[in-house]
Image (tube, rainbow, N blue to C red):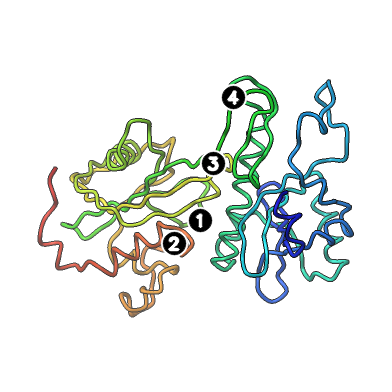
Amino acid sequence: MPPHLRFPSAAFALFHGTSALITKEKQTKIVYQTGDMLQKLYGISIEQLQPTNKSSRLTTSGNSSSAPYFPCVALGASVSGWAFAVDVSKRSKEDVESKAEAAGEVAVQFEPVRALLAVLTEEDIAVAGLGASILAWHRQHQHCGVCGSPMIAVEGGGRRACTSCRNRAYPRVDPVVIALVTDPARDMVLLGRQRVYRPGMFSCLAGYVSQCESLEEAVRREVKEESGISVGDVMYHSSQPWPIGRGASCQIMVGYIATATSMDISMDTDELEDCRWFSRAEVAGAKELVVSAALDPTGENPGGLSIPGPYAIAHHLIKHWLLTTTPQEASGGRNKL
């Protein structure tokens, strides 16, 4: 029996595509609703949250023969009960929002998960990211890659199973390397800008890991391809799940600090709009860094630089460089391969 039937106290977070239902009454947060509220407000019964199956949900022509199915996946359990993510894309956003507000929710609306990363708590970011990414994965894997038959969600949405052959599919995670490239001799860092970034924002260089490639090799290749800069030493820093990758894919960002062995930029204009070396003063002046006041007492931002906020690993790579290195270290020269 699915967990949401065994635990009547289950809470449901609603998603419309890659947007999550949130409220901005006092603090922006995820809206949770009970199974009874789903039925009362939107006419969605617990039975409609069940995974589809070949015998009861599909006719011989492959069309749905019953009430619409709303994909539902388990997010996890806590002392207060189970939490689930429900895809209500079969309802209009406006209909769900208006009915939720009529039931007493204040300032309710669907917001893209990407836009919520800067305003939600860490707990709600985890819920929004996991819910949006795993529901997107289920939408994108409706049929078996072996025999083409319909697939169904099983184990609370933790995997998909073919209704014909024995094929199983598990949620994919795409590995991506992201690196802050430094030039110790000049006390500078290399940052790039994509066309989709907000005005003035630059970030670390990043790219997907290729098959049969180590993470360190991926760093060197991506930096060389995008900027023309050669990289020597590569030091691991940390990693971060990134549930809002291209095509709503879930990525694991693996962060590195890399040392440049060349200076001249030859930018790939298909990948980047701009790529530059930035000085310590320019980086410290970025408004997103709480360390800027200490490193730049004037409060000025000489280059007008903006970087990703604390929700992104790039922010922490840049901040780590500012806090753990000093201009005096530049006298050591540039590392060699």
Which dot, 4 or 2, sits closer to the camera? 4
Residue at 33 percent of width and 30 percent of height: 212
Q: In this view of the protein, which residue sits in the foreground, 305 or 91? A: 91
Q: Quadrant of residue 160?
A: top right
CA gap between label 4 and label 1 equals 41 Å
Return the disc, 4 or 3, that comes first in the chain's sequence: 4
Which disc, if any, is residue 270? none
Percent position (x, y) of residue 122?
54, 66
CA gap between label 4 and label 3 equals 21 Å
Task: Identify the amino acid type marked 3.
Answer: Arg
Quarter containing the C terminus: top left
Number of other residues with Cα within 10 Å of mark 1, as a class: few under 14, some 14 to 19, many 20 or more: few
CA gap between label 4 and label 2 equals 43 Å
Outermost residue, left side: 332
Return the disc, 4 or 1, that comes first in the chain's sequence: 4
Task: Identify the amino acid type marked 2.
Answer: Ser
Q: Are dots 1 and 2 in contact, CB under 8 Å?
A: yes
Q: Secondary structure at mark 3?
A: helix
For mark 3, what is the residue?
246
For mark 1, what is the residue?
199
CA gap between label 1 and label 2 equals 8 Å
Which disc, if any, is residue 145? 4
Q: Secondary structure at mark 1?
A: loop
For mark 2, what is the residue?
306
Percent position (x, y) of residue 120?
59, 66
Above or below: residue 249 compared with residue 3: above
Residue at 69 percent of width and 46 percent of height: 17
Number of other residues with Cα within 10 Å of mark 3, as a class: few under 14, some 14 to 19, many 20 or more: few
Q: Secondary structure at mark 4?
A: loop
Residue at 87 percent of width and 56 percent of height: 39
Residue at 33 percent of width and 64 percent of height: 282
